[in-house]
Amino acid sequence: MTAPLRFDAARTEDFDELGELLGSLFHGGFDTESWAVEKDLLEPERTVLVRDGTDLVASATAYTRELTVPGACLPAAHVSMVGVAPTHRRRGLLTDLMRRQLGEVRDAGREPVALLWASEGRIYPRFGYGLASQRLVVECETTELRLPGPTPAEGRLRLARPAECRAELARVYDVVRPDRPGWSSRGEVWWNYVVSDPASHRGGATERRAVLHEGRDGVDGYALYRTRGEWDAAGPKATTIVDEVVTGDPAAYLALWRMLLSLDLTRRLTYRAAAVDEPLLRLVNEPRRLAPQLSDGLWLRVVDLPAALAGRRYATAVDVVLEITDELLPTNTGRWRLTGGPDGATCTASDGPADLACDVRCLGELYLGGAGLGELAAAGRVRELRPGALAAAGPAFGWHRAPTGMEVF
């Protein structure tokens, strides 16, 4: 008789074995330098390992962090390192892992939502995750791009190694983050990860560099980037690879991008984490040259429905009864009255007639303000049960900034 698979919380002595499994599953190999930093992020009690005998065959973890949502910051389970060995696929093991993890998050009662970056977009909707944000991938020629001319601004740019200016990076990030739905908190261990720069992650490019913008009151913006050199018979054609640009000041934003787009000997630029409403598209002389491509960003799962809907703010006043179905977490199934606005919200069980009906995946798509009720209704995924309910409630779920995410987990 075959012994049942064993689900165990990880121990620190299991971490290297986990790294080897993940390196195989994601086809990157096991790199001791990068894993030395990455395994410091792991929380053993939140990391589930599945064994068949002594063989490690599957895993899933979650990080304890905050997530910026419209008008607030909430605890959120940041799901990662989910994988199943090829020898154990098609056995329902991933479903078992997801059910277990979501149940643990719900039972702990601290995190009303969970989120992740998906290796493939078709995987997680069946577990109730909705596409909460999208991003633009920019891969462009820079030779003909121009930005507005210099403006009278009190500021200068300064180059530094990220590890040497991490305190300044963290201060800027913490100032900007509360206004950016989809951005996650970064404690000390996460900044260790952000500024680490193992050679295996460089893809043949240089070490990561930081450029800081110093305004009247100190550093008010930064960018992290690297370059990949290349030459041909016509001369230099290096590529600038931008990891993130963080600032809340338009003058700093313009100054940072003016440098990134005009580095000597470069002819191309890649930026894979641009927001759908990225200001750069409104600044360059020819936005078509940026050749932006839309891609998926964060996937979000509502775990504790009333806490999640009451935890965010709403762009306009809203009073609506939602009829929700949730097969994996039945406590979310039912009718819920959401009442709120820009200053706060409540969400309670209701016996009244429903105005709108959808499944929990739709709530994940709506939650950060990235999708609209109207577009989900047009796709047949939200049903209007009371005439006029869509038009009345739709604006409330939006926000003044499109959600995006920093891809560091």
Image (cartoon, helix red, strand yellow):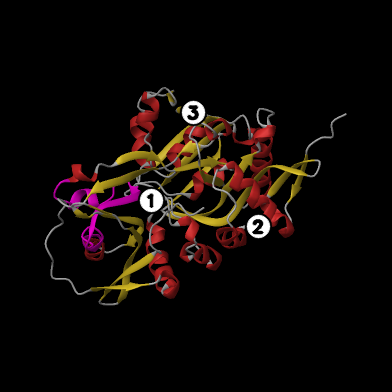
Tell me which corner region of the image, top left, top right, bottom left or bottom right, holds residue 219: bottom left
The span shown in magenta is 257-286
At label 2, counting other C-alpha atoms closer than 10 Å, the crowd grade (few under 14, some 14-19, many 20 or more) is: some
Residue at x-position 67% and y-position 39%: 97
- Is residue 77 among the parts visible in the rendering? yes
Q: In the rendered structure, find residue 358 and report the number of the disc placed on it.
A: 3
Name the residue nearer the viewer: 23 or 172. 23
Nearer the camera: disc 1 or disc 2: 2
Spatial separation of the CA atoms under disc 1 and disc 2: 35 Å
Of the residues shown, which amino acid type is indicated by label 2? Glu
Q: Mark 2 = which residue?
A: 43
Q: Residue 225: within the magenta? A: no
Q: Amino acid at mark 3?
A: Cys
Q: Quadrant of residue 89?
A: top right
Tell me if I can see residue 109 in this picture. no
Which numbered disc flags the more N-terminal residue, 1 or 2? 2
Residue 273 part of the magenta segment: yes
Q: Nearer the viewer, residue 65 or 34?
A: 34
Residue at disc 2, secondary structure: loop
Tell me how far mark 3 sits from mark 1, CA to CA. Answer: 24 Å
Q: Would you identify the image quadrant in which residue 206 lies?
A: bottom left
| Mark drawn on residue 342 | 1
